[in-house]
Every structure is written in C-alpha cells, then in structure tokens.
Image: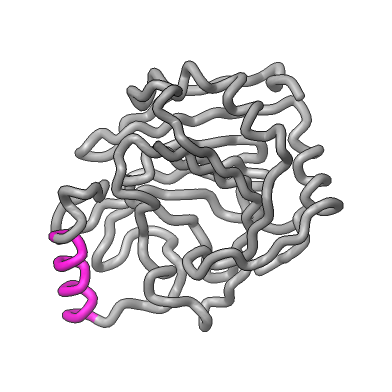
C-alpha cells in the first residue's frame, strides 16, 4: 500500500503546555482495504477493562507502513530516536459500551502512559459523524499532560474534584466542570493523529452516538501504541 497522492501532514502545538500533535491527512492510498480486512478477517473482542468497546489486531504490515512513511517525521516531531522503540502494537478499535455501563475512568480524559517519549496514534477509518478526538486541560492543576513526576499530585487533585462535585456518567464530548477541551480533531476518513501518551485526551462521543458494531458503518479506528 502506498501513500495517498494527496498525503499531507502538519504539527500543532496544543494548549498552554504546547504539546505536539502530528496530524496526517490522506495517509494511505487504499484505506478501504483496512476497513474490509477488519470486516472480513478479524474477530473484534474485549481485550482490556479500560477501553469502552472491542478491539482486534491490525494487519501484520500496518506497523511497517507507519515505519516506512512516517518514521522520520515522528522522530523529528517528538524528539525520539527509532532505536529507542521497544514495542509497537496496532489494533482496530470500536467504541461500543453503552453510557449506562461506563466506569468512572471511561468518563474521564485519560493518559496512556507516564512516559513522555511514548506515543499514541489514532487512524480514523470512519467519517466525522462518528466523533474525533480531543485533548484536555485539568482545571484544578492546569495540567495538560501527566507524566511520572505529576501522577501522584494529579491523582490526588482529581479525586478531590470528583468527591466535591458528582461526576457525570457519560462520554467526554467537550468541556465540563473538571476538564477544559483545548484542541479537537475531527474524525476525517484516512486521517491519523499522533500525540504523546502523557497528553490528557478522550474520544468525542456525542450523547446521540450510535453504537454500531459493523466495521463498515461504525466508529472504526486503528489505535497504535509506540512504546519505549
């Protein structure tokens, strides 16, 4: 699979803390192949207690495509050396958990790792009506990312805020009493966004979201974790 002929990318520096987000539009030449592969050849299943939906492994060559076409840009943007990378995992993901079954942690913006060199990517294989991804600032601390030096204080302040005002049981979709949305990226088909795992983020899941388990019509993404 080649790069799309209209491939483009840019880097945004988000919020007060200027965390980088790499935005890739028109990534691959045949993204429909990835949708069809998921529909025909994967078995979506619940693989962890944190993600509010189902996942399945992406095709074996998907990570190679990222490495081939985006390696230099990723390394430059996030100031990492690809020799530092120890593992990469890419999974199809579909949000399917009804609101009344959400755990508190699934209603909050979150971070994926306390290591600021580790990266997360979301490749949208759906349209903008399915909801994109937003980054957030925790109002009480002003933190827009949480690393190992901030984790204990952040957890303490977050717990205090939740105890003071009951937190709503719903998906994030904009600002609320504890978190301010500082950037939002629409789910444009064949767009990929890449950000540090420490950045506070959440999918944009609207109150009228349709929980559709069909990869061809639901909120299908490929979520990639680049670990160091």
For the C terminus, which image quadrant? top left
> Percent position (x, y) of residue 5?
71, 17
Q: Which residues are magenta?
A: 153-165
> Percent position (x, y) of residue 27?
64, 28
Q: Residue furthest right?
A: 40
Residue depicted at x 71% and y 66%:
212
For the N terminus, which image quadrant? top right
Tell me, yes or no, whether the highlighted magenta stretch contains residue 55.
no
Residue 15, above or below 48: above
Residue 44, above or below 187: below
Residue depicted at x 45% and y 23%:
82
Residue 155, above or below 118: below
Colouring of the image: one colour
> Percent position (x, y) of residue 80?
36, 24
Tell me, yes or no, whether the highlighted magenta stretch contains residue 154.
yes
Q: How many marks?
A: 0
Instruction: Tell me: 160 left or right of 71.
Output: left
Residue depicted at x 71% and y 61%:
44
Instruction: Name the chief secondary structure element in magenta.
Output: helix
Quarter of the figure with residue 18: top left
Instruction: Tell me: 67 left or right of 167.
Output: right
Residue 212, above or below 135: below
> Percent position (x, y) of residue 13?
32, 30
Residue depicted at x 51% and y 21%:
71
Residue closest to the eye, 4 or 59 = 59
């Amino acid at each position: 699979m080649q790069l799309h002929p209209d491939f483009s990318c840019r880097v945004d520096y988000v919020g007060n803390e200027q965390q980088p987000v790499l935005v890739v539009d028109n990534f691959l030449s045949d993204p429909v192949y990835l949708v069809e592969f998921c529909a025909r050849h994967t078995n979506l299943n619940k693989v962890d207690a944190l993600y509010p939906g189902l996942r399945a492994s992406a095709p074996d060559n998907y990570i190679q495509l990222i490495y081939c076409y985006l390696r230099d840009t990723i390394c430059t943007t996030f100031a990492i050396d690809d020799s530092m990378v120890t593992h990469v995992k890419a999974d199809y993901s579909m949000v399917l958990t009804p609101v009344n079954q959400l755990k508190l942690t699934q209603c909050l913006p979150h971070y994926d790792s306390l290591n600021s060199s580790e990266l997360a990517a979301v490749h949208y294989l759906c349209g903008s009506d399915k909801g994109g991804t937003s980054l957030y600032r925790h109002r009480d601390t002003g933190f827009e990312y949480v690393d190992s030096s901030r984790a204990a204080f952040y957890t303490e302040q977050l717990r205090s805020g939740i105890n003071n005002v009951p937190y709503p049981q719903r998906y994030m979709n904009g600002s609320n009493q504890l978190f301010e949305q500082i950037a939002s990226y629409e789910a444009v088909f064949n767009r990929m966004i890449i950000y540090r795992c420490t950045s506070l983020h959440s999918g944009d899941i609207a109150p009228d979201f349709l929980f559709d388990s069909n990869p061809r019509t639901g909120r299908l993404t490929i979520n990639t974790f680049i670990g160091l």
